[in-house]
Image (cartoon, rainbow, N blue to C red):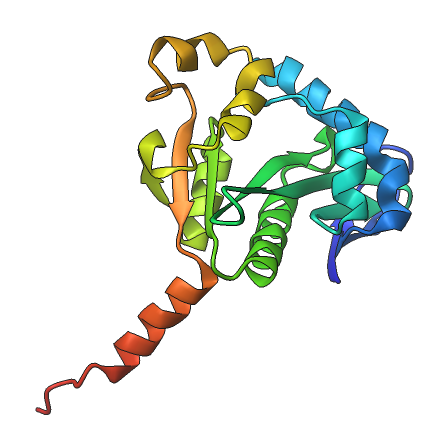
Amino acid sequence: MYKYVHCLPSTIYRPMNIHITTAGAEHVKYATSICNLIEEAAKKRGTGIAKRKPEYIAEKLAQGKVVIALCGEEVAGFSYIETWEHGKYVANSGLIVAPQFRGQGLAKQIKKAIFDLSRDKYPTAKVFGITTSAAVLKINSDLGYKPVTFNDLTQDEAFWKGCATCPNYDILQRTQRKLCLCTGMLAPSKEESKMAVDLTDKIIKPTT
C-alpha cells in the first residue's frame, strides 16, 4: 500500500491521508463514484476520455486490476488495467484525480502504482496508452514510455471500439485509425527491461 499525505478533501477542512492501494472486492461499492468522475472529467475536458459503465469498473475492482486512491470514503483518484491480444499488450486506462485533490502529485503516484501493478501481473506484456493530456504524457515519459504510431499499439478491435464514446471518435474513423488527437505511447515489458539491464551489465568497458 502506498500513502500520500497532506491533501485537503472537499468534505472537511483539515489535512487527511490519502491511501493508494490495489483494489479488491471490498472496493466494488465505489464503481458508480468512479464512473461519475470519468463522466465529469470527459465533459470538462471535452476530449480524450472514453466513458465506462459501473458494471465494467466493478468487475475490474473485484479482479484486483485497479489502483484506487481514497481519502476516507471519498474517491480521490484511480486507474485500471486492460489486457489485449491475449496478454501481449496492457493498457493503463482511466487515470482520473478528483478536482479537489489535484495539483499535489497524486496522478503521478497513481500512475506509477498502476504501471508497477501491470508489470507484476503481466511481465511479458508491453504497456501502452493513448492520451491528450500533457501532464499524463510527462508522467508516461518519466516511466519510460516512448511516443509511437497507432500501428505500434494493439490492433485488437475491442480496444479501439472502446474509443467510440470519445467525442473525437470520428477523427479516428476518418483517418483509418492512424491519427487522432491522442498521442500513442509504449513502454517495454518488464522482461524486456530486465533483459536490457542484464545486457548493459555485460558490456565490457574499456580501461583507461
Q: Is residue 65 left or right of residue 87?
A: right
Residue at x 35%, y 30% (from the top left corner): 150
In this view of the protein, can residue 24 be seen by the observer? yes
Tag count in the figure? 0
Q: Position of residue 70 (x, y in %)?
A: 82, 46
Quadrant in which the N terminus appears: bottom right
Q: Position of residue 17 (x, y in %)?
A: 82, 53
Q: Is residue 143 above or below residue 160?
A: below
Along the line of sight, the residue nearer the viewer: 194 or 76: 194
Residue 192 location, quadrant: bottom left
Q: Is residue 38 left or right of residue 159?
A: right
Residue at x 71%, y 46% (from the top left corner): 66
In this view of the protein, can residue 145 be seen by the observer? no
Q: Is residue 116 left or right of residue 169?
A: right
Q: Which residue is most to the front?
A: 86
Quadrant in which the C terminus appears: bottom left
Residue at x 40%, y 53% (from the top left corner): 144
Q: Is residue 52 above or below residue 21?
A: above
Q: Is residue 173 above or below residue 23?
A: above
Residue at x 91%, y 42% (from the top left corner): 73
Q: Is residue 101 left or right of residue 147?
A: right
Q: Is residue 120 above or below residue 14?
A: below
Along the line of sight, the residue nearer the viewer: 181 or 61: 61
Q: Position of residue 39 (x, y in %)?
A: 71, 19
Q: Position of residue 114 (x, y in %)?
A: 62, 51
Residue 91 location, quadrant: top right
